[in-house]
Image: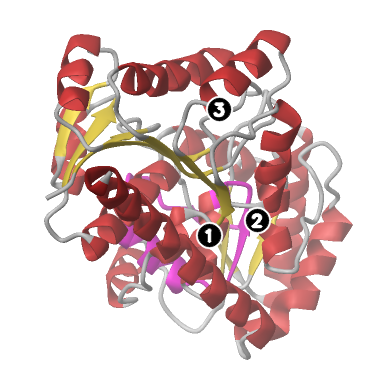
């Protein structure tokens, strides 16, 4: 029976990170049904309720030390934990948990991480120091591999896999149909989902999304559905975009579980996403997607599918957004076989993360 501790951005109501944790727990227990998992969380009670695993508070270092002492492995990940763009404090926090585990003699695995950007000199030095102490690293894209090389992390073996969420199986669409019906979203009109996020209080991209959404309602007869991935923040930015629109739209203004979100996305005809995991949910549910970039992780994910973003939050245009929807619109009736093949390959790579983690535990025990 493996005792595994998972460190990450959990317990903060971010649907993408909670989906990542769901996927990791599912995959790890598929490989090792007896695995006992404890999550270091910002809200242990919520994590226990959502995921059915043990959890401890992320700043309770005595308790974290206690669970690490009895553990077989610390997993750090997945997601974009190791970067200093949104916050340098969080990078040092996650490195401190990894360092504590190593000081206690426990193996550490970076699990399908999206590495970087790491820009500060002190942050890069810390990444190089702690990164070279860990036992195994898997990253979710080639860009993260190159970032590790630039940081001088070269001691542990590194494997390029895929985002853990891609290992989730598609869910029943009936769950999402019930939710959409509650918001009056039933009938023959196509549903165009938009998953936004706030960024530095910028207004340009909000105006562009509003203008493009209005034009697409008029041209294609779509119904616009705003889907918050981080609640309630994404609901607030959705309302700001809605206030700029002339056409009606619907905001799904509540917090959903991972299964509900996947099912809702599966009922959309197309999704336009700023949030990475909204795009990944669309991939899992085989829904055509369009990405708007605010971070290299968006670019990297779309590149793995042979695609690219339609612009950044700074330079996106209404015309470019409408043109991309028009070009992709035939896919709502006929799937893109090449993209589906790539998604299936990524799903297999995502599952390898769990296989490598359990193999690390078993190798340590034999050693």
Whole-number angstrom distance, CA of label 3 to CA of label 1: 30 Å
Task: State the residue position of label 2.
Answer: 301
Left or right placement of residue 177 versus residue 188 in this view: left
In magenta stretch: residue 249: yes
Marks 3 and 1 close (CB-CB < 8 Å) = no
The part of the image, by quadrant, that contains residue 266 is bottom left
Q: Which residues are magenta?
A: 248-276
Q: Is residue 19 above or below residue 225?
A: above
Q: Residue at x 59, y 21 (%)?
A: 127
Q: Is residue 118 above or below residue 167?
A: above
Secondary element under disc 3, as helix, strand or loop, is: loop
Q: Residue at x 38, y 73 (%)?
A: 170
Q: Nearer the viewer, residue 229 or 170?
A: 170
Task: State the residue position of label 3.
Answer: 132
Tell me if I can see residue 130 in this picture.
yes
Whole-number angstrom distance, CA of label 3 to CA of label 2: 26 Å
Mark 3 or 1, closer to the camera: 3
Task: State the residue position of label 1.
Answer: 280
Image location of residue 324, percent across then percent down: 80, 67
Marks 1 and 2 close (CB-CB < 8 Å) = yes
Q: Residue furthest bottom?
A: 334
| Rendered-image quadrant of the C terminus | top left
């Amino acid at each position: 029976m493996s005792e595994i501790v998972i460190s990450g951005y959990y317990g903060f109501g971010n649907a993408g990170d909670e989906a990542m944790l769901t996927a990791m727990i599912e995959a790890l227990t598929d490989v090792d049904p007896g695995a006992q998992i404890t999550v270091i969380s910002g809200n242990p009670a919520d994590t226990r309720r959502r995921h059915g695993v043990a959890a401890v508070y992320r700043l309770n270092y005595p308790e974290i030390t206690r669970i690490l002492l009895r553990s077989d492995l610390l997993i750090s990940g997945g997601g974009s934990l190791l970067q200093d763009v949104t916050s340098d404090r969080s990078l040092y926090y996650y490195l401190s948990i990894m360092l504590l585990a190593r000081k206690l003699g426990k193996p550490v695995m970076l699990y399908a991480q999206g590495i970087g950007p790491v820009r500060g000199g002190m942050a890069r030095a810390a990444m190089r120091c702690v990164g070279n102490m860990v036992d195994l690293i898997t990253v979710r894209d080639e860009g993260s591999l190159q970032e590790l090389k630039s940081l001088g992390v070269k001691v542990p073996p590194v494997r390029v896999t895929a985002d853990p969420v891609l290992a989730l199986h598609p869910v029943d669409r009936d769950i999402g149909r019930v939710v959409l019906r509650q918001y009056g979203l039933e009938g023959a009109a196509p549903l165009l989902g938009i998953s936004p996020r706030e960024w530095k209080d910028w207004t340009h991209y909000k105006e562009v999304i509003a203008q493009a959404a209005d034009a697409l309602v008029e041209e294609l007869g779509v119904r616009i559905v705003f889907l918050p991935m981080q609640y309630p923040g994404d609901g607030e930015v959705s309302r700001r975009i809605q206030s700029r629109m002339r056409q009606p739209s619907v905001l799904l203004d509540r917090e959903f579980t991972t299964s509900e979100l996947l099912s809702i996305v599966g009922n959309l005809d197309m999704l336009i996403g700023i949030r990475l995991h909204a795009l990944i949910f669309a991939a899992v549910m085989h829904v055509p997607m369009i990405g708007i970039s605010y971070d290299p992780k968006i670019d990297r994910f779309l590149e793995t599918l042979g695609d690219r973003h339609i612009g950044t939050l700074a330079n996106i245009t209404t015309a470019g957004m409408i043109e991309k929807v028009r070009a992709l619109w035939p896919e709502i009736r006929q799937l893109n076989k090449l993209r589906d093949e790539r998604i299936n390959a990524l799903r297999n790579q995502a599952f390898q993360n769990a296989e490598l983690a359990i193999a690390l535990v078993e190798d340590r025990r034999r050693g």
